[in-house]
Amino acid sequence: MAGSNENNPRVIGPRNFHEGLRAGKISTALGPSRRALSNIDWNVIGAPYPSAITKRGLAEKHAIQTKNPPIPVHRPITRNFAAQMSNERQLKPEVTKKQVHSVPTSGLDDSTIVIDDDGDKMTDDFFAPMYVQHTEAMLEEIDRMDEVEMEDVDDEPVVDIDSLDKKNALAVAEYAEDLQQFYKKSECSSCVPPNYMDHQLDINDRMRGILIDWLIEVHYKFELMEETLYLTVNIIDRFLAVQQIARKKLQLVGVTAMLLACKYEEVSVPVVDDLIIISDRAYSRKEVLDMEKMMVNTLQFNMSVPTPYVFMRRFLKAAQSDKNLELLAFFVIELCLVEYQMLEYPPSLLAATAVYTAQCTVTRTQQWSKTCELHTSYSEDQLLGCARLMVGLHQKSGTGKLTGVYRKYNTSKFGYAARTEPANFILNSRF
């Protein structure tokens, strides 16, 4: 394009133009240029970058030395060029409000003055070739897209844990999230003061631990449902928090609490005589029934409270657990049932921490996904304090006198979960 005047007459030296007027050769000078304009426009349209012009070639081959000052020349866009532009829609360049022309200042100098249709001189920064501006903009856009894609890759997706249960009517997937929100709001009704044993005159927290450790064995012997055990412990704590009991009646409270939990949760309820036999006939049938009346009246017949079990099932689903992780999580949280100090934490936090501790134990790394954080409403750093206590309970689960949970989960039925090596690295982890 930059080789001859016929192929590129778009930039014409003004002195050449006036020299032709004085010599009377204007017709021959302009004739070939006008006839070649359509070819020029076609070449410009067909080029990959319409505004790519080599300035040095034009200055060397088309400029004529003269002493007269340069006069800017404006060449309008022809109809033929506009028509060709409309036909070539896929390569149609953008039309700005002002048409810009470049005029060489001298035949020996390749510098160019850029002016617009109003005759105003424009800065050199504006005269960046269109293909350069287009390329830079395109590269910037690619960089932004790469950054967005990298962010999308780095961001961990949140899994819809109810998507597979939408066709299962028993899973009530439509109400699952609403139920969890209700449990979370009402869990304070199932909590007791963590220091309620200070108001008991004849029993202490050690006796409570012995009672619950024994009830875990009774629960296992009767093959009761899992939720029955959590409701039994909850009934005991809520009753002892408001009612003083003599030491010799503490086992009676435990047996009666299990009877009430079985009536609420089980399909087949153990008879009173079986409970009397399991307690070595320490109490009569009448004593059990009288204690039952006393407990339900004290608790105002309120048995519908969220225990850690209802949260455990939801949080294990969010963690996409397998059988090994599930057994280990239940092993850890049952260790917490025996410990009086764990009453400091609400049921949802205990359940979330049990799942977190079990994950760390299985994978040997600290792991808490965005899905778990969303459904539990707890971040990893919020669970770390309670997790350290759970790891400590796991370490000493097979020692001492209270080994009911350890012996239960050291069987093939529960996958020998008690034999798993504790996640000791959590004790030294920092955030």
Image (cartoon, rainbow, N blue to C red):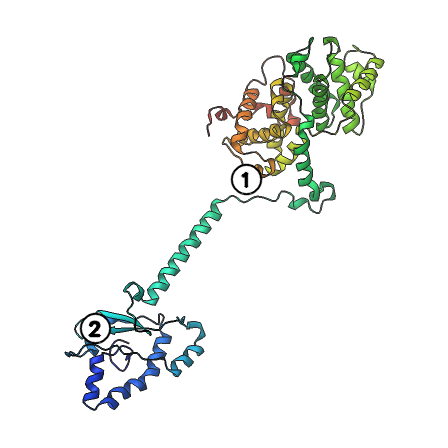
On the rendered structure, is 136 left or right of 71? right
**Between 208 and 266, which is closer to the camera in this rendering?**
208
User: Marks 1/2: CA distance?
Assistant: 65 Å
Nearer to us of marks 1 and 2 is 2
Return the x and y of residue 87 as percentages of the image width and height.
44, 78
On the rendered structure, is 251 left or right of 352? right
Kind of element beneath mark 1: helix
Kind of element beneath mark 2: loop
Could you tell me which residue is drawn at 63 percent across and 15 percent down? 402
Q: Residue furthest right?
A: 286
Q: Considering the image in quadrants, where does the N terminus appear?
A: bottom left
Quadrant of residue 37 within the rendered picture: bottom left
Quadrant of residue 285 within the rendered picture: top right
Query: The disc labelled 1 sits on which kind of residue?
Result: Lys
Q: Mark 1 near mark 2, Cβ–Cβ under 8 Å?
A: no
**One can see residue 416 in this view:** no
Could you tell me which residue is drawn at 40 percent across and 54 percent down? 143
Q: Can you say whether 366 is above or below 130 in the image? A: above
Return the x and y of residue 301 as percentages of the image width and height.
79, 25
**One can see residue 64 in this view:** yes
Q: Which mark is residue 370?
A: 1
Question: How many residues crowd mark 2 within 10 Å: few (<14), some (14–19), many (20+)?
Answer: some
Q: Can you say whether 260 is above or below 63 in the image? A: above
Return the x and y of residue 240 as percentages of the image width and height.
71, 16
Quadrant of residue 295 within the rendered picture: top right
Mark 1 or 2, nearer chain start: 2
Q: Which residue is disc 2 drawn over? A: 105
Query: The disc labelled 2 sits on which kind of residue?
Result: Thr
Could you tell me which residue is drawn at 51 percent across and 43 percent down? 156
**Between 121 and 312, which is closer to the camera in this rendering?**
121
On the rendered structure, is 315 left or right of 121? right
